[in-house]
Amino acid sequence: MPRALLTILVLCSALSAGACRDEGDIEVKSLKFEGVEGINEGDLRAALQTKKGSWLPWGKNRYFDRRAFEADLQRIQAFYRDRGYPDARVTSFDVELNDTQDEVDLTINISEGEPVTVAEIRFEGFDVLEGRQRGRLRRTLPLQPEQPLDRQLAVASRERALNALRDAGHPYAEVQLTQETVGPRSERLVLKATPGPLAHFGQVEIAGQSSVGDYVIRRQLLFEPGDTFTRTKMRDTQRKIYGLELFEFVNVESMEDRAQQPTEIPVRITVAEGKHRKVNFGVGYGTEEQARVRVRWDHVNFFGGARHAGFEGKWSSLDRGVRTDFTEPYFYSPHLSLRFEGQAWQASEPAFSQNTLGGRVILQHKADVQNQWSVSLINEYQKSQISNEALADFTLRDELIALGLDPRTGEQRGTLSAVAFDVGRNTTNSLLDARRGYVLNGHVEQAGRWLWGNFNYWSFTAEGRHYFPVARRFVIANRLQVGSIDAAGDLESNVPFYKRYFLGGATSIRGWGRFEVSPLSGFGFPIGGHTMLEGSSEIRAPLWGKIGGVFFADYGNVWTDSWGFDLGDLRYAIGPGLRYLTPIGPARVDFGYQLNPEEALRVNGEVQQRRWRVHFSIGQAF
């Protein structure tokens, strides 16, 4: 019996009325597969036209279409063949209508059969690559021995091998992919290369600029005429030129002649300048900052040479003030930049308020798009004052004196002079919403001793983040951060009060409010500490359209003594969250629940009444 007629009969027989109903009225409630083991079911679903409707009330409905369903039955077998399962078949399918005959549940039964596997991948003609390059290529091929012979992965492996040759100075390289049968359901893949001549970069032509000098662009180049040709350096050069923020368009292309195959390849760089003066104005709301207003002015070619000058003003309930900065992007080397910052800033935290007047000089080295380090010289006048709630806690009187705070006003004044060293590596695919890669950051700061100023301490913090996708839909994100600050001579007054560690809030342990996780005074008020550890794990998944969901687990604590970690004394919080993707990052709402609350904690002068917090903000928590 033809499959089309069989499909109609199965569908019609399920109708209690005995007559076929218009297919467009029948919604696909569910689509299930039985027997799927060797392939990714999510990939299979994505390849089919027949899809189930959304479970969300406002989600998109999907309706049964007989012709599309018939095509999908054939498409399933073709999908399996492309992935190394030539004997896969749809053995049967079930179509079940509900009582009102407006929804259908579909179940497709599949027999996968035995796959054709890759016995070996042989490389021929790749001797022009160094041994470690060949080893890395072999390890990173999308298709590996003993896997099913997936045709898409085989083609991707050929492309990977071709790019390896072209990245090693052989722009005219060609790679052929052939198969050899070595046994029942076993194939050998042969990647045969014709490398062609070794090539070098030729002259560089620049076009499209008007007010920006050629030298500004040329000093961003990561290659020179005569260097071995590589596409990687061309791509990284394009990113570096974009990083100047001078151009709306940048294209770096090689002028290859595949017919003549010259060994000296000219390069053309085409740019289109953007606006050099920019003003950004923004308003927003968050549970910590509440209403906020921010204005930013930038001049990205200040006095020429791609020098960058900026001015920022901001107001919110959490912090407010003005900042200015100036950056010399080329400081004796394309990798070095020199930055000057100045600010008059006020922060109003739950535990204290702080006024800062001063600035810093930062020398930054950026080796490439992933790795950088910097050295900073800091000179700032600081005025800190603890909250009135803490000042009313008479159990703190002796501690306030030890901290260098006036026990009558709760104030601490002084000049902070310090040197800081930062190092970082970022391999993530996005700064706003990473799905893969990792981030490593380290910070060391020394104040006082051979420097002027009123404070004397050294501190260390380190942070690691890791993101990896699972089954194409999910992202698992992890973060761990540790830090400690050590006062010289064990004098508490050598550490500014605002430098003490506090945890809790929208980007920290989300079961607590901002700065609510820390050592407490006898009155139950958070007073900060000298050592901290915090971590988070999240499972992120899309739900519908631009809406996504997360489930998180946060942990950490702050301890009084320097390097006084106590892993048996951690605070834990869990909860769900929602994300809405915007051009400036995900808008998020998180509901955090305390698994082990701090019974003595006081919030707004009262013992905390609830074990949960709700946080609203922009951007991922980490």
Image (spheres, grey):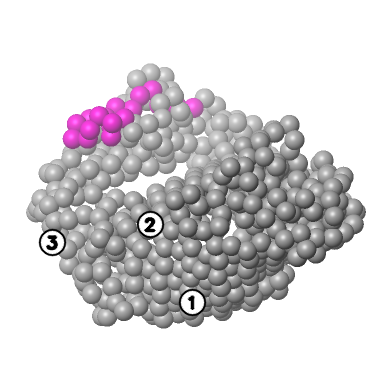
Q: Residue at x 53, y 71 (%)?
A: 343
Answer yes or no: do the residues labelled 2 and 3 have beta carbons within 8 Å? no
Q: Earlier in the sequence, mark 2 or mark 3?
A: 3
The spot of residue 506 in percent (x, y) is 70, 56
268 inside magenta stretch: no
Q: CA distance from mark 1 to mark 3?
A: 39 Å
Q: Quadrant of the N terminus?
A: top right
* Residue type at numbered disc 3: Gln
Q: Secondary structure at mark 3?
A: strand
The spot of residue 200 in percent (x, y) is 14, 50
| Residue at image mark 1 | 311
Q: CA distance from mark 2 to mark 1?
A: 20 Å
Q: Would you call the spot at circle 2 few (<14 residues within 10 Å), some (14-19), or many (20 or more)? A: many
Q: Which mark is residue 203?
A: 3
Q: Nearer the viewer, mark 1 or mark 3?
A: 1
Q: Residue at x 51, y 52 (%)?
A: 447
Q: Camera-side residue: 230 or 530?
A: 530
The spot of residue 273 in percent (x, y) is 33, 77
| Residue at image mark 2 | 364
Q: Would you call the spot at circle 3 few (<14 residues within 10 Å), some (14-19), or many (20 or more)? A: few
Task: Please give left or right for residue 622 compared with residue 571 in the image.
Answer: left
The spot of residue 180 in percent (x, y) is 31, 26
Q: CA distance from mark 2 to mark 3?
A: 30 Å
* Residue type at numbered disc 1: Phe
Q: Which residues are magenta?
A: 115-135
Answer yes or no: do the residues labelled 2 and 1 have beta carbons within 8 Å? no
Q: Secondary structure at mark 1?
A: strand
User: Vertically, is 502 above or below 296?
Assistant: above
